[in-house]
Image (cartoon, rainbow, N blue to C red):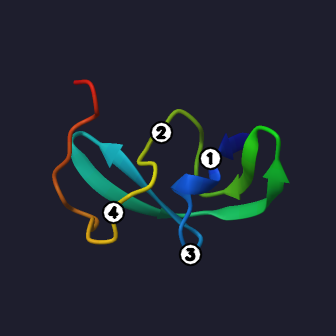
């Protein structure tokens, strides 16, 4: 089971970082828990989520992990 912070989900989608590129994934959540939103479908765990993405950040954009 995968849990994500609510700040990572917008309109049933999350943005993740894959090899320096922003990728959009559709997720199905089933409710909030103390650990975060429970993701039933769309993520496998271990993805690098982009929290609080700016509205103008689009899939395909180049990005770097903070602190890298």
Q: Nearer the viewer, mark 4 or mark 2?
A: 4
Q: Which mark is residue 47?
A: 2
Q: Give SS at disc 3.
A: loop
Q: Give SS at disc 4.
A: loop
Q: Nearer the viewer, residue 44 or 6?
A: 6
- Mark 1, Cα crowd under 10 Å, few <14 / some 14-19 / many 20+, is some
Q: What is the spatial separation of the Cα atoms under label 4 and label 1, in whole angstroms?
A: 16 Å
Q: Which mark is residue 11?
A: 3
Q: Nearer the viewer, residue 30 or 34?
A: 34
Q: Which quarter of the image is occupied by the C terminus?
A: top left
> Of the residues under marks 4 and 2, which one precedes in the sequence?
2
Q: Residue furthest left?
A: 62
Q: Give SS at disc 1.
A: loop
* Callout 4 touching callout 3 (CB < 8 Å): no
> Of the residues under marks 4 and 3, which one precedes in the sequence?
3
- Mark 2, Cα crowd under 10 Å, few <14 / some 14-19 / many 20+, is few
Q: Residue at x 34, y 57 (%)?
A: 23
> Of the residues under marks 1 and 2, which one precedes in the sequence?
1
Q: What is the spatial separation of the Cα atoms under label 1 and label 2, in whole angstroms?
A: 13 Å
Q: What is the spatial separation of the Cα atoms under label 1 and label 3, in whole angstroms?
A: 14 Å
Quadrant of the rendered image containing residue 28: bottom right
Q: Residue furthest top?
A: 68
- Mark 3, Cα crowd under 10 Å, few <14 / some 14-19 / many 20+, is few
Q: Nearer the viewer, mark 2 or mark 3?
A: 3
Report the residue marked by disc 1: 5
Q: Which mark is residue 54?
A: 4
> Of the residues under marks 1 and 3, which one precedes in the sequence?
1
Q: What is the spatial separation of the Cα atoms under label 4 and label 3, in whole angstroms?
A: 14 Å
């Amino acid at each position: 089971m995968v849990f994500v912070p609510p700040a990572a989900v917008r309109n049933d989608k999350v943005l993740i970082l894959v090899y320096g590129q922003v990728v959009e994934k559709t997720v199905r959540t089933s409710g909030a828990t103390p650990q975060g939103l429970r993701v039933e479908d769309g993520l496998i765990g271990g993805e690098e989520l982009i929290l609080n993405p700016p509205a103008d950040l689009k899939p395909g954009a180049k990005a770097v992990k903070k602190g890298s």
